[in-house]
Amino acid sequence: MRIGSCMRFGGKCAAIGAAALLALAPLLWSGAVDAQTLRSLTERLDRLERENRQLRKEIDALKAAGPAPAKPADAPRESGGPGYVRWNPAYGYAVLDPTSDIARKQRLILDRKKRGTLAPDSVHVHGAVTAVANYQASNRADKFGYLMRHPTASNQVGKEVSEAAIHSAQLGFTALLGDWVVGHAAMLFDPEQSFGAGTNTDLERNQVQVRRAYVLFGDLARAPLFASLGKMAIPFGLTDTVNPFTASTVWHAFGGLANGAAAGYAGESLNLTAMAVQGGSQFRAANAPVKGTDVPSRLNNFALDANYTVRLGKGRTFLAGASYLHGSAYCQDFPIAHFRPCRDNNPAYDLYGRLVLDDLTLKGEFARTLDVWPGTFNPDMPRFRASRVTAFDIGARYRLVSDPAPFDLSAEFSRFVAGPDGAPWERQDQFVVGAAWFARPSVKLFAEYVRVHGFAPLNFMSGGSVRDAEGNVMMDRTISDAGARSNVFLLGVNAAF
């Protein structure tokens, strides 16, 4: 066997040569090479030469056949097994968290996708349960201004109430369909804040709704652009809270949810979002009349948001932003009732900021309608003129312990204003002190003390529902009460996956 011919066959020929050397080594070492041994060596070399010729034929045949066909794994995936359905508790907590990134979940999804948290061609399943126990006391019978459950006499009777209940439960998915298409949906069970009639155990209040559902287009690794179509939060204001559980009054007043189409620019510092909002009275905080009705048969409402983030160093940022909503919810005539049609739209604007300095977070927000809310004028109480609607908040949160289980302390003040000085529905203030301990990255245990001044529920806020002993409506009376005071002591847990 020639050395030159052997070199052409690479690793296989080298292996044959190595085997021959191993066979010869003991004999060469001992020097005991006799005639019998020479015959044995000759036979071995002949056998190796035959194997060498056979290998050369096989290699020539493979070269003539051309490149190997593509592997089946390179073809598009038609279906997925267990590896395609995943969950990430940290992502599940973030995407379902009702206290942060409320109006920016699309950006959150795209950021996690860019980081690699969400892999292409996979479905991430997520869910969360929030359970609470609380004690509430009021100086007015049946009037509790705490808005994390609907303030109605159907559920809060007397001057003291208490409960241990499920506040909400969520279940959703985020499906990544290739590099730039995402399907996202989340279902919500919230008997405490449902718009259904009856008590918290009434079947009408114990329904499951699709809270958000949209198709999201975008790949921030390639371009800072995105678009979404479906049911989503309206990009108006920040509406977040530093509280561990209780939502800011700004969210209660202006946090929108609607059908529509949104598009935006998601830069490192500058973020721009525009949304075409379905007309009529939407799910939350948006109403633009369609030919004098509340029928959502036109895309005649819209929202714009712009914000900019300044990076002040590692762990330090300042966010400032402004928003505009063409048709807010505050456009109905007297008497006021949810989702009623309006004669004209009432625009609103919002200014917000957030400063993060390592473990300290400070935030503030101010939102107001451009025009007065017609329904805040009661013709039977003419001394109280119609008023614009205003909401604002200021808050701070400090991370007292970072590792291994973060512990936060927070405080926030927020106000809702809907009437002139002296009106029973003038305002409702909310002050919250909270503490939160993260037993796991997706499990938050919390405690809050809440103080509420004023009682101004939106339905019939300026009058039209108080009846006398004979059942007649006394139009010069209102259920609103500026002198009402509520105190809330609350414990709870939010567990997500």
Image: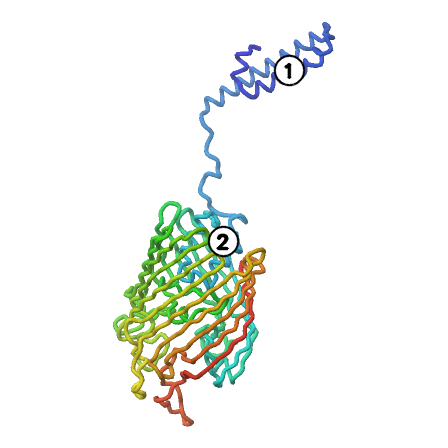
Residue at the image point whose x is 50% and y is 81% from the top: 156
Q: Is residue 356 left or right of residue 463?
A: right
For label 1, the crowd category at 10 Å Cα-Cα, with few meaning under 14, some 14 to 19 and many 20 or more, is some
Q: Where does the N terminus fall, quadrant-wise?
A: top right
Residue at the image point whose x is 38% and y is 62% from the top: 353
Q: Mark 1 falls on what kind of element?
A: helix
Q: Is residue 226 left or right of residue 14?
A: left
Tell me where residue 305 sits by quadrant: bottom left
Q: Where does the C terminus fall, quadrant-wise?
A: bottom right
User: Does residue 341 appear in this view?
Assistant: no
Checking the image for residue 20, the label placed there is 1
Residue at the image point whose x is 38% and y is 50% from the top: 268
Checking the image for residue 124, the label placed there is 2
What's under tag 1, amino acid-wise?
A: Ala
Residue 131 or residue 41, whichever sits in front: 131
Tell me where residue 293 sits by quadrant: bottom left
x, y (%) of residue 148?
47, 72
x, y (%) of residue 193?
46, 72
What's under tag 2, amino acid-wise?
A: His
Question: In the orientation shown, which residue stands out farthest toward the bottom?
Answer: 470
Q: Mark 2 falls on what kind of element?
A: strand
Q: Is residue 246 above or below residue 78?
A: below
x, y (%) of residue 66?
44, 25
Q: Is residue 206 above or below residue 186?
A: below
Residue 43 or residue 493, whichever sits in front: 493
Q: In this view, does 456 lie above or below 186?
A: below
User: Does residue 372 appear in this view?
Assistant: yes
Q: Is residue 414 left or right of residue 2?
A: left
x, y (%) of residue 163?
56, 76
Between marks 1 and 2, how big is the CA–CA gap?
57 Å
Checking the image for residue 423, the label placed there is none
Question: In the orientation shown, which residue stands out farthest toward the top?
Answer: 35
